[in-house]
Image (tube, rainbow, N blue to C red):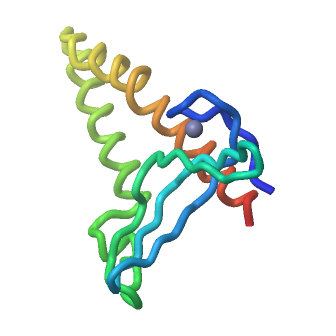
Amino acid sequence: MNEVVKCPKCGKPGRLAVHRVRSKGRVYAYTVVKHVENGKVRRCILERILERAEGERSPAPADLGYSYEDALETIHALFARARERAAQGDLSELEEFVVWLERKLSPAVTRWYEEAKALLQAR
Ligand SMILES: [Zn+2]
């Protein structure tokens, strides 16, 4: 069974799951938190993760024009430029990088990692 999480929508405990819906020849999938209340299932929708025509396959990362390595290289290039400017005495870009890392990237990576692990454990 899926890991119990605190629902970010309603604050109650529930289990993280993927909810798939077919409607009018289209397929939708959502990450949801499933709550069981009085024997009934209630779902809080977190995010739509899929919408496409039935039978259509999801594009591979390469087809999206991205790869994990590209993502890493992009971040590294931004850091390298900030570091170079810092070496020339301008610290503003390095400061901006640290703030972005702390406020945006790090929390996002943690959230995606936890969600991915919970979904894998659900199999
Ligand atoms: Zn909820």
On screen, residue 109 above or below 107: below
Quadrant of picture, ligand 1: top right
Question: In terms of image quadrants, where is residue 68?
Answer: bottom left
Residue 96 coordinates in the image, percent (x, y):
27, 18
Q: Number of marks in the image?
A: 0
Is residue 33 or residue 87 the one in the foreground?
Answer: 33
Residue 40 coordinates in the image, percent (x, y):
70, 52
Residue 79 coordinates in the image, percent (x, y):
32, 31
Q: Is residue 56 left or right of residue 113?
A: left
The residue at the far bottom in this view is: 55
Question: In terms of image quadrants, where is residue 27?
Answer: bottom left
Q: Is residue 106 left or right of residue 80?
A: right
The residue at 40%/57% (across/down) is 48
On screen, residue 45 above or below 59: above
On screen, residue 59 above or below 74: below
The residue at the far right in this view is: 1
Is residue 45 or residue 89 the one in the foreground?
Answer: 45
On screen, residue 6 above or below 69: above
The residue at 40%/48% (across/down) is 72
The residue at 55%/63% (across/down) is 19
Quadrant for the C terminus in the image: bottom right
The residue at 76%/51% (across/down) is 39
Q: Is residue 81 left or right of residue 31?
A: left
Residue 22 coordinates in the image, percent (x, y):
44, 78
Quadrant for the N terminus in the image: bottom right
The residue at the far front in this view is: 38
